[in-house]
Amino acid sequence: MFDKTLRIGTRDSQLALWQAHKVGDLLEASHLKTQLVATKSAGDLNLTQPIYAMGIQGVFTKALDIALLENRIDLAVHSLKDVPTQLPEGLILVAVLERGNASDVLVQTHKADLQQTSTIATGSFRRKAQWLHRYPHHHLVNLRGNVQTRMDKLFSSNWEGAIFARAGLERAELLGSHFQELDWMIPAPAQGAIGVVCRTTDTAIIEELQKINHQSTRICVEIERDFLRILEGGCSAPIGAYAFVNQDKIKFKAGVFSIDGQTAATTFEEVEITEGKNLAAMAAEKILSEGGNQIMQTIKNGKE
């Protein structure tokens, strides 16, 4: 019987605590004892710079990585879209919970005609690039902070709207009715999924965490994260990737966008589940050969 109290590391935002409690509830359902240990990340402490300008890999995860490696916590719970594709040596992504809604939404302060010049807020390169690709006449402003902070900033502004992850708003019970689902926008890799990381040497903890892993979600987010890794894009890069299982097939849509939204390379692939391991590489090769390589090189060279 595993009788150790598991120390669950989490950021201290409302959404992060919801996710940590979710993991804790699943573990306690298996008669394990848990304790939450909250901390702030670099991304929480710096709310002025856009994420992509901070120059840090894993701005929302590094503090918890260090806490794990220093044995101050036993596992860390993350929004998986924030987790770099390459974890620090000694750490492993053990479990992925069943995914929530992966889509982005536009929350509006008032009903606005988006065909007119509008101001839209987001702190995400990916959202900014895709929005400008569709609405090149709009003005995009930076918006940082936890979900509640961003929502407060939106409703105290004169902006027409701000873009959020639907899953985050639902979990924080902030979705409301003034939103528009952006079914044309390709989500961030692993958006809507919760990941659990622990030390590679903690075999007993790994065994317990594997019991809460949702395998079909895991398959899909691994494809998305592999695609991101192959393109050598960080979590803040203007890259969208979304895989989902439909009967015996995996469907995958992905795209790379220039930061100004003027150019894009996208693809939609469909394969049998048994061929899923090659899907990320196949999609990446296609996108890179159809303009994606030039877009990525321009971004890496900082020419935009």
Image: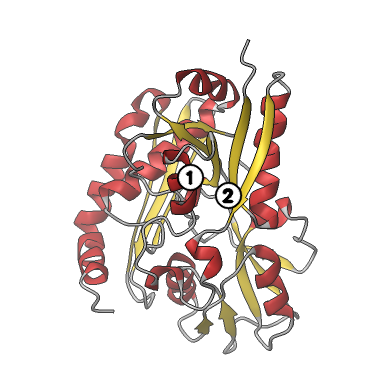
Give the mark, 2 or 1, whose residue is nearer the N terminus.
1
- The label shown at residue 121 is none
- What amino acid type is highlighted by mark number 1? Ala
Left or right? Give the position of 178 relative to 226: right
The quarter of the picture where the C terminus appears is: bottom left
157 or 102, nearer to the observer: 157
Marks 2 and 1: CB-CB under 8 Å?
A: no
In the rendered image, which residue does mark 2 sit on?
102
Left or right? Give the position of 225 relative to 37: left
The percent coordinates of residue 292 (x first, y second) are 25, 60
Res 4 visible: yes
Instruction: Estimate how packed mark 2 is, as few (under 14), some (14 to 19) or many (20 or more) residues with alpha carbons within 10 Å.
Output: many
In the rendered image, which residue does mark 1 sit on?
67
The quarter of the picture where the N terminus appears is: top right
Q: Quadrant of residue 214?
A: top right
Between circles 2 and 1, the one closer to the viewer is 1
96 or 68, nearer to the observer: 68
Q: Quadrant of residue 12?
A: bottom right
Q: Quadrant of residue 99?
A: top right
Instruction: Estimate how packed mark 1 is, as few (under 14), some (14 to 19) or many (20 or more) residues with alpha carbons within 10 Å.
Output: some
The percent coordinates of residue 91 (x first, y second) are 39, 36
The percent coordinates of residue 13 (x first, y second) are 66, 57
Q: How is the image coloured?
A: secondary structure
Residue for point 22% across, 71% down? 298
**Which element type, helix, strand or loop, lies under badge 1?**
helix
Left or right? Give the position of 39 relative to 63: right
**Which element type, helix, strand or loop, lies under badge 2?**
loop
301 or 148, nearer to the observer: 148
- What amino acid type is highlighted by mark number 2? Ala
170 or 44, nearer to the observer: 44
